[in-house]
Image (tube, rainbow, N blue to C red):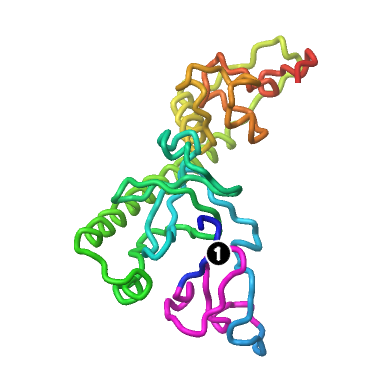
Amino acid sequence: TATRHVNTSWCFACLRSGGLSGCQRCPASYHIACLPDSPSAAPAAAPFTCTPCRLSWQPRCGDIVWVKVGPFRWWPCEILLAQHAPENIQRLGRQLGTFPVRFFGTDEYYWVSLARLFPFKDGDLGESAAAAAGSAGTETAELMDKFNEGVALAQEAWRLRDRDRQDARRLLGELSAVPQPVSADFDQPQPAAPASQEPQLQQAEASASSLMAKCDCQRRGRHCGELDGCANRLAGIECHPAACGPGCLNQRLSRFGWLNGAV
């Protein structure tokens, strides 16, 4: 099923198989000897929790990940918001704790949980042919072509997302270095940033908003109200002004709505 735990057949450190110990929360597998903090007297296949899980790593919408479904090999996918999946996928029965992913190369969709995915990294090529044959049996040439195409598309998507993250960090670092005037009087207009800094500030805000969780209320002709099914409201966060238009009703704190008691 979509929530049944599965671990990889290779060590995440040395990439070899045999004598592996699987993380109890995610698919990661290691040789106990390959773990940097493993005790010398630990059994060969002792259960453990990997470092990302101990640090409470959680996947985010738009992340590129490897996913395991049924007898098929690990496949590169993109995590989607539930409302961005096709309508027929949304109507499928789903289990608690699952979310939709899109498979690169085949454009198919499936509901999965954290127990069946791990992050995609730059340069990943997937399982070796021998390892894949052991888990998926004989694969057709057409399926192999789709897998190779999917890996290439996933690498491109990962690099674009990583570049956006780096640009946003750099631009927000420059933005934080700009002195921000503070006024005790909310009715007085704040001095504008120098004209030379305006393009940088706008680009920083746009890049930062592209990494934030976005709702689809505007696409549905809604305004993020209490009954609009806003994804950000359901997550307990405000919409960002750069991501939603001026008609958004989920920006009370940022617009000082609390001054009038409208919280």
| Residue located beneath label 1 in the image | 5
Residue at the outermost bottom position: 41
Q: Where is residue 186 in the image (x, y as percent from the top left)?
A: 73, 14
Above or below 69: residue 227: above
Question: Which residues are the magenta region?
Answer: 9-38
Q: Position of residue 148 (x, y in %)?
A: 26, 59
Residue sitting nearer the eye, 161 or 142: 142
Q: Farthest residue in the top direction?
A: 187
Judging from the image, what secondary structure is the residue with disc 1 in? loop
Quadrant where the C terminus sits is top right
Image location (x, y in percent) of residue 25: 61, 64
Main SS category, magenta section:
loop
Q: As drawn, is 212 to the left or to the right of 219?
A: right
Spot occupied by residue 117 in the image (x, y as percentages of width and height): 49, 58
Give the residue drawn at x 56%, y 23%.
241
Whether the magenta-drawn stretch holds residue 22 is answered as yes
The structure residue drawn at horizontal position 62% and vertical position 19%, both measured from the top left corner, is: 225
- Residue at screen point 48% across, 16% down: 221
The image quarter in which residue 164 lies: top left
Residue shown at the point (45%, 74%) measured from the top left: 9
Nearer to the camera, 140 or 230: 140
Is 155 included in the stretch rendered in magenta?
no
